[in-house]
Image (cartoon, helix red, strand yellow):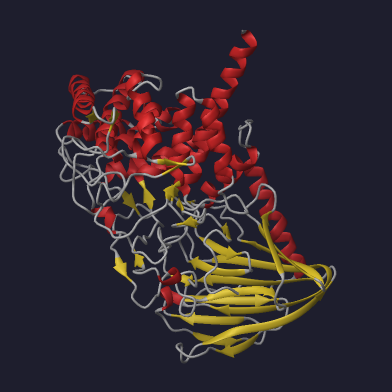
Amino acid sequence: MDRYPPIADHGLVGDLQTAAMVSAQGVVDWFAAPRFDSPSVFAALLDHDRGGYFLFAPEERGVTCRQLYYPDTAVLVTRFMSPDGVGEIFDFMPPDRTGTPTDRHVLVRGVRAVRGTVRFVLECRPRFDYGRASHELELRDDGAAVFRAPGVTAYLQSTFPLRAKATGSGAAGLRDVHSELVLNTGEVAAAVFTVCGPDGEPPEPPTPDGVVGMLWQTVEFWQRWVRRSRYRGRWPGMVNRSAITLKLLTYAPTGAPVAAATMGLPEQVGGERNWDYRYTWVRDGSLSVRALLDLGFAEEAAQFTHWLGERLGDRLRGRKEIVGEPLQIMYRVDGDPELTEEILPHLEGYRGSRPVRAGNAAAEQLQLDIYGEALYALAEGREVSMRASYHGWKNLARTLDWLADSWDRPDEGVWETRGGRNDFTFSRVMCWTAFDRGLRLASDYSRPADTARWTAARDTILEQVMERAWNAKEQALTQTYGSDVLDASLLLIPRLGFLAPQTESWLSTLDAMDRTLVSDSLVYRYDPAASPDGLRGSEGTFSLCTFLYVDALARAGRLRPARYAFEKMQTYANHVGLFAEEIGPSGEQLGNFPQAFTHLSLIMAATTLDQALDEARAQYQDD
């Protein structure tokens, strides 16, 4: 096995409360439990020696590996081909069907020989609490291996014998599990890894028939869910995979999506831009509402808007006046605002990318754009969001009343820079969006509101942005007032309606981005050298921004470059259709993986481009 396989050489499996990464070599090298944001059980992606992993793969070297998802599911199939035989591993986690938080999570690894004879080896090396906690191992009479660490118990059960194996140097006192087995054509075996609380009861021992039954139940769950999609456009494979990925990254008990399944994966290998993305950003979640509704997933959109309404009310309940900021930029999946950031110095980081951070200090930043994204979500999902009570509306109205006095402030901006506050244009555009959508909701649903005050704030912001963010030399709106730096976040402007998509000022801004931020259809979010962000090193192009670029091109009527950029972007997806946060100079995927924001923007771009192409074809036929 590779010490550090490429980030893109992974598939994702999950049960809608947590998730695991499985490499194309059959190694689970990331898994946190009981939630996405919990300490890791396997984290070899962040430290091969100390992080822990679960390998299940052919013993023979030089095997050809291929990986795919079973169609329209989150069941991952890893195929191993050799001269002696062909083997397959089915990795999956039975999905949560209750919506109730649980500390019990099951990772199933079923294996079979498809042709010939295949020798498999199993190594299970859990390292609890990011590799900081020791564990004890017990091999029970029923064949189960039991790992006990402070606050957690894990069971490894299989349909074949397991044996203990002492670890090497650097982990004195720990024992892990090892096994070898030989399968002939048609034979099936399985290993089931169950994490639970310290007093959790062991599951029933697995049988081949029982594991196959769980497999088909999981397949049916996902295929039935995908059939609810009403997408009938040109890219069903990409869109369905992105929808499944968004679902996998959503915490079922609250409906809150995490930004990514992982933490600490670098934006530049060897650099310091290594963040923990296992939390719910108001921005990402809010924009997902429109994407979900476009696909027909109203239940998921409704659940998130309810979560968002709860966050709006957290600091307002029982108060007539707001003290502090009504919203935080991100939360834990259960709504907890505490995301204290710590550095894990004992982990070397992916390919030496240090520091490894758990938690995210950006939660304490001031980012005024989140109010626009929150109101955008509630307005876009009006068919589900307006079920809120009268008191829910009052919370929203009080927030906008507060924002009317609070929008005109420097902040850290949408990209969470750590170089100080500034007058970011995107933050002002989103404050405009907050008032614009609030006014629409108040009018459409006859809600009590200080509409005169909101209207005045909305109009003042528009005039301020057009006067102070416009750069005559660049003929474009820029990242901050008075600068000449371009920023890809402004690609959302035509979708928001701040400027019409084919007006002269917007088209010239789009042209300036083409010259400055676009490289072979891939889009940088901004130039860190021209706009210092307080961090060392560089970064790749942002896949999110590339899909926003496609969306903006399509709205501007530039359909040929929009479609070509979208088609080219497909070549950067990994072998199972997943995207990390960024793409490096050689086309490699960088950053946390897979990134929900990228997949929701893919859905947005696909639906916008489909509609624009359909309209163009209809017009051509009419002519």
**Which quadrant: the C terminus?**
top right
571 over 407 or under it: above or below: below
Instruction: Describe residue 188's horizontal placement relative to residue 487 as left or right.
Output: right
Direction from residue 415 to residue 209 in the image, left or right: right
Residue at 56%, 51% in the rendered image: 578
Identify which residue, 227 or 475, lies in the foreground.
475
**Residue drawn 67% across the image and 55% down it:** 68
Residue 542, compared with residue 201, is above or below; it is: above
Could one spot residue 195 in this view of the protein?
Answer: yes
Q: Is residue 192 left or right of residue 417?
A: right
Side of 562 relative to 180 (left or right): left
Question: Where residue 347 sits in the image (x, y, percent)?
Answer: 39, 75
Q: Quadrant of the N terminus?
A: bottom right
- The location of residue 524, given as percent across then percent down, is 39, 45
Choose top left, top right, bottom left or bottom right for residue 459: top left
Comparing 602 with 475, the one in front is 475
The residue sitting at 66% across, 68% down in the picture is 109
**Residue 323 in which image quadrant:** top left
Q: Residue at left 61%, top 13%?
A: 620
Q: Quarter of the image holding residue 487?
A: top left
Q: Position of residue 333 (x, y in %)?
A: 40, 54
Asked whether the viewer can see residue 388, the reply is no
Residue 141 in percent (x, y) is at: 66, 87
